[in-house]
Image (tube, grey):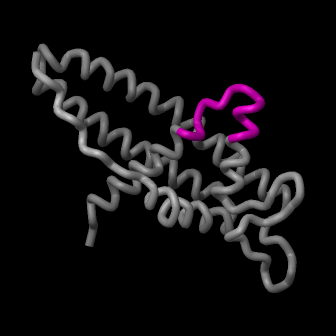
Amino acid sequence: MYDSTLFIYTTFARGLLFRLIADRKTPEEKNRIESYIRGMLNIGCKSCGALKENGKIPDNGQPDRTPEQEKADIDAVIATVEEFSQEVALLDNQAKDAKDRRRNEPQAAALQLTALQARKNALIENKTNALINRLSSVSRANFRSFINEKLKQKIKIVPAQPTPVS
């Protein structure tokens, strides 16, 4: 059975992750986010090659990905997130315009905001599927595990406080 609250929650978590990774400009920001992605995908330490605490060395003693595959997976995450960032910026601008009109046209603005949220959720799902198709099988499993076992567990959704009427 389809659980819409799970869908929204997972979509919300993925959207937060995409926004966290997006728009890194300086070399320092790029290095930091690459390190974050290495941890997210459970890729070993860049400088020493040590595996993360949750990482496993396969029974044959060989790493589960080559350095080229690791780099390709990191690049896939960054490229997908940048595509998401460009596309979601258009939706964010439309949402801002709708919110600005909310006082004069509350029903029309509410309908537009609902439609924009649905489009944003669809975009997140689309980019998630694109990312999963770009990742190696090990990184794909690690990405799903990161979302479900780490990121979603740490998100606290707090109800919005009502805006006082003046």
**How far from the left and from the top, in percent, is residue 60?**
85, 84
Q: Check the picture and name the quadrant holding the N terminus.
A: bottom left
Q: Is residue 27 above or below residue 49?
A: above
* Residue at the farthest right position: 48
Say whether residue 66 is left or right of residue 149: right
Residue placed most toward the observer, 113 or 119:
113
The residue drawn where x is 30% and y is 18% is 97
Q: Is residue 152 above or below residue 115?
A: below
In the image, 166: left or right of 69? left
- Is residue 142 rendered to the left or right of residue 119? right
Secondary structure mostly seen in the magenta stretch? helix
Q: What segment is highlighted magenta in the picture?
A: 20-32
Residue 7 location, quadrant: bottom left
Question: Residue at point 46% right, 27% down?
Answer: 89
Q: Is residue 4 magenta?
A: no
Residue ID at (58%, 35%): 22
Task: Tell me which corner region of the image, top left, top right, bottom left or bottom right, holds residue 107.
Answer: top left
Left or right: 5, with 49 as reference point:
left
Residue 93 lies, with reference to residue 70, above or below; the image says: above
Q: Which is more toward the observer, 163 or 141?
A: 163
Against 94, residue 57 (above or below) is below
